[in-house]
Every structure is written in C-alpha cells, then in structure tokens.
C-alpha cells in the first residue's frame, strides 16, 4: 500500500467515526472521501473496491442532495458520472448509460442555477 493509499484509508476511518458521532458536520466530507477513494481505486484497477466506495458516496450524496440540492447536486451528479465510467470499464453498458443519464440530469439541475456548469451537461451527454 502506498503512502497516499494509507493516508486516504486512515482519513476514511476517522471520517466514518466522526460522521457516526456528528452526521451533519461530517457526512459531506465522508461522501467526498468515498468518491475520491473510488477514483483512486478505479485508476489503480481495484474495480470492486471502487464500486463500493462510489456506491457509498452515492448513498450519502443522495441523502444530502434531497435535503439541500443547491449544495450537493453537483457532487451527486459527479458521483453518478464516476459510476458511469466505472461500469463502462466493467463493460456493463446498461448500468453505465443509466448513471450517465442520472449525471446529465443532475448537471442540468446544477446548470439552471449557474450556467458555468453547462460544460458538465455536455460531458455527460458525450457519454450517451
């Protein structure tokens, strides 16, 4: 395990503990950490671990976005996009398309409030 992997894993353990004690304070950080760890695992071809982290991030971001869409919809859409990339790598085209569609919808919602996010709508669309 590299130093980077060790630091991320240690941070993840701490965030899990803190989020259990104070969810409103630490769930956003935990979700971001899960998503980032998923990216690292996908890039290092640890695909099952990537899937688990992305799905955990998705679950948390879905909860957060339901409570505060303007704050968390972009993060949720980004996680959907990452899941789409993962499922493309795994050659699960049906799942990939589903998540790219969800990403596009999330990016559209985000872009309504800020046109600077329109490029992400195009990015998701390019995968469909």
Image (cartoon, helix red, strand yellow):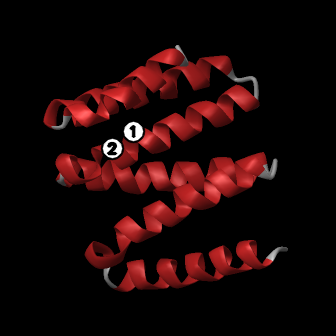
Q: Residue furthest front?
A: 116
Compared to 75, does 109 lie above or below?
Answer: above
Nearest to the observer: residue 47 or residue 39: 39
**Where residue 122 is drawn, which disc sits there?**
none
Q: Which residue is mark 2?
A: 74
Q: Residue furthest right?
A: 1
Q: Position of residue 23 (x, y in %)?
A: 32, 75
State how many labels appear: 2
Alpha carbon of mark 2 to alpha carbon of mark 1: how far? 5 Å
Count residues near mark 1 (Cα–Cα under 10 Å), then give few for <14, some for 14-19, many for 20+. Answer: many
Left or right placement of residue 79 versus residue 91 in this view: left
Q: Residue furthest left?
A: 113
Contact, mark 2 vs mark 1 (Cβ under 8 Å):
yes
Q: Quadrant of residue 113?
A: top left
Left or right placement of residue 11 versus residue 57 in this view: right
Q: Which residue is mark 1?
A: 77
- Placement of the N terminus among the 4 image quadrants: bottom right
Q: Position of residue 32 (x, y in %)?
A: 46, 61
Secondary-structure class at tag 2:
helix
Q: Which residue is painted at 73% across and 72% down in the image?
A: 5
Q: Residue furthest top?
A: 128
Left or right placement of residue 49 versus residue 128 in this view: right
Q: Which residue is painted at 68% across and 26% down in the image?
A: 88
Q: Position of residue 75 (x, y in %)?
A: 38, 49
Q: Which residue is painted at 40% across and 78% down in the image?
A: 19
Secondary-structure class at tag 1:
helix
Left or right placement of residue 71 versus residue 106 in this view: left
Q: Position of residue 37 (x, y in %)?
A: 62, 61
Q: Which residue is painted at 50% across and 35% down in the image?
A: 81
Compared to 115, does 21 lie above or below?
Answer: below
Q: Quadrant of residue 18?
A: bottom left
Count residues near mark 2 (Cα–Cα under 10 Å), then give few for <14, some for 14-19, many for 20+. Answer: many
């Amino acid at each position: 395990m590299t130093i980077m992997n060790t630091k991320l894993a240690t941070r993840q353990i701490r965030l899990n503990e803190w989020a259990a004690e104070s969810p409103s304070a630490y769930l956003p950080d935990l979700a971001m950490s899960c998503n980032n760890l998923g990216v690292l695992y996908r890039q290092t071809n640890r695909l099952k671990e990537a899937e688990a982290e992305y799905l955990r991030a998705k679950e948390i971001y879905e909860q957060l976005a339901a409570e505060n869409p303007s704050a968390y919809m972009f993060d949720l859409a980004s996680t959907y996009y990452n899941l789409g990339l993962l499922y493309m790598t795994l050659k699960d085209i049906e799942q990939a398309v589903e998540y790219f569609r969800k990403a596009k919808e999330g990016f559209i919602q985000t872009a309504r409030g800020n046109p600077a996010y329109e490029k992400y709508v195009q990015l998701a669309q390019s995968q469909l």
